[in-house]
């Protein structure tokens, strides 16, 4: 559990996993995709086919926006490639607001509804 700091006089409890994101956050569906555990929270989608990686990132973004109830704050989109041979070639990262991935907007709306 974590608490969201805000202008409100009371804290709001968040149910977070070990990476600090909401346990209810939709997980990327492919084994090559993941949510990182760093402050700006890159969500990575890797594939040898760029359109496929972009489609998976878009599908995840749609599911996450539905879950969150508002648009996800995507700070940047990073595209890289790995020509090492043993890993997928394209690496698409969505750099997302960590409070969105933690479910803070959901918790704030729930707290307002209990007032």
Image (cartoon, rainbow, N blue to C red):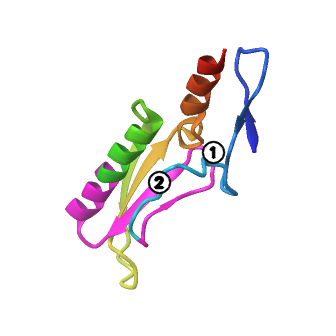
Q: Which residues are magenta?
A: 31-58
Residue 70 visible here: yes
Which residue extends farthest front? Answer: 114
Q: Residues within 10 Å of mark 2 (few under 14, many from 20)?
A: many
Give the residue number, with chain letter if any, for mark 1.
Answer: 39
Query: In which quadrant of the rendered view does residue 31 lie?
Result: bottom left
Residue 30 horizontal/vertical position (percent): 38, 68
Q: Is residue 33 magenta?
A: yes
Is residue 96 toward the left or the right of residue 54 in the image?
right
Residue 113 horizontal/vertical position (percent): 59, 19
Report the Cα–Cα distance between label 1 and label 2. 12 Å
In this view, 98 is above or below 17: above
Query: In which quadrant of the rendered view does residue 108 lie?
Result: top right
Q: What residue appears at the point 65 percent right and 20 percent down from the top-left corner?
A: 114
Circles 1 and 2, Cβ within 8 Å, touching? The answer is no
Query: In which quadrant of the rendered view does residue 37 lie?
Result: bottom right
Which residue extends farthest bottom? Answer: 86
Q: Is the N terminus in the top left, top right, bottom left or bottom right quadrant?
A: top right
Which residue extends farthest left? Answer: 51
Disc 2 is placed on an element classified as strand
Q: Nearer the viewer, residue 11 or 34?
A: 11
Q: What residue appears at the point 43 percent right and 32 percent down from the top-left corner?
A: 69
Give the residue number, with chain letter if any, for mark 2.
Answer: 43
């Amino acid at each position: 559990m974590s608490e969201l700091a805000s202008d409100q006089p009371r804290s709001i409890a968040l149910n977070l996993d070990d990476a600090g994101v909401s346990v209810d956050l939709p997980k990327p569906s492919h084994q090559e995709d993941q949510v990182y555990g760093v402050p700006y929270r890159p969500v990575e989608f890797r594939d040898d086919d760029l359109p496929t990686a972009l489609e998976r990132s878009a599908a995840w973004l749609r599911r996450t926006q539905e879950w969150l109830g508002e648009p996800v704050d995507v700070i940047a989109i990073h595209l890289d490639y790995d020509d090492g041979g043993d890993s997928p070639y394209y690496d698409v990262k969505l750099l997302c607001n960590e409070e969105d991935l933690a479910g803070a907007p959901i918790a704030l709306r729930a707290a307002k509804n209990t007032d």
